[in-house]
Amino acid sequence: MITQVGPELGKPLHESTIKAGLRELNPGMHFDLGAAIGQWHPYIGKRQGVFYQGAHICSMDRGMIPEFKAWGVEERTVPAQWAEADQDNASIRWAIVPTSDPEYIDKWTAAQAGQTNEYAVRDDGSLMFLTPWKTITARGRVWGLGWRHTFAAILFRNIPKITHASLGAKFGIDAMAFPQGAPEEIHAALFEE
């Protein structure tokens, strides 16, 4: 659960403020149905469902909710370019090319002559296909959804009396703010849970 929110995560709102405000805008809004009926889910201690007249809309954090979504960080192994193959975070993976490959002789000849990085001949004469990989630090799982995520999902559903203007007035926010970036980044900022 998020207990402290830094300035990099924007203006925080408490879940009770969000719940009360949304119910005032539309009494059909309700929350945390899983906990209310005793249905456990893996994130029950950290997140709750947001519903409109029984239909699930999205998840929402518990406690103090940051304005913006926050992701964890994880290491991933991804394909690399040959120019990156000698870096400390890189490695070479290999697989034996079957002799049934229709281009086996051409590949073996090119590898034996040192004309390719992708193929090498082993001491036993078999042909290896080589691929460079590198380890990178990348965005991981979402650990904080942020109230903008919740409001965007609700607005997407066109729920009566909940508009950009009514959210702005109720919570003292600029509800028209929209994430910037590439299409996949915007989609992640709005909908990834």
Image (tube, rainbow, N blue to C red):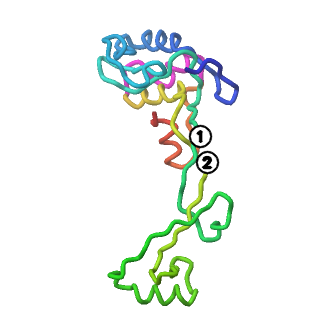
Q: Which residue is mark 2?
A: 137
The answer to if 144 sits in the magenta stretch is no
Give the label on residue 41, or none. Answer: none
At x 37% / y 10%, what residue is drawn?
27
What is the x, y in percent for residue 88? Answer: 68, 59
* Above or below, comparing residue 76 to residue 146 in the picture: below
How far across and how far down the image is residue 7, in percent?
Answer: 70, 26
| Label 2 vs 1, first from the N-terminus | 1
From the viewer's perspective, tell me whether residue 155 is left or right of residue 112: left
User: Disc 2, disc 1: CB below 8 Å?
Assistant: yes
Residue type of the residue flagged with mark 1: Val
To which residue does mark 1 refer?
73
Residue 112 rendering spot, x and y as whole percentages = 53, 88
Magenta residues?
158-173
Q: Quadrant of the N terminus?
A: top right
- On the rendered structure, is 141 left or right of 157? right
Q: Circle 1 — which element?
A: strand
Towards the viewer: 90 or 155:
90
Q: Is residue 69 left or right of residue 102?
A: right
Task: Tell me where residue 100 appears, x and y as whole percent.
Answer: 32, 81
Quarter holding residue 178: top right
For the point 55% across and 16% down, the residue is: 169
Question: Disc 2 residue type?
Answer: Thr
In the picture, the quarter occupied by the C terminus is top left
Q: Is residue 153 above or below residue 20?
A: below
What is the residue that sits farthest to the front in this orientation? Answer: 124
Answer few, some or many: residues within 10 Å of disc 1's Cα (few below 14, many 20 plus, some between 14 and 19). Answer: few
Residue at 39% over, 21% down: 49
The quadrant in which residue 66 appears is: top right
Q: Secondary structure at mark 2?
A: strand
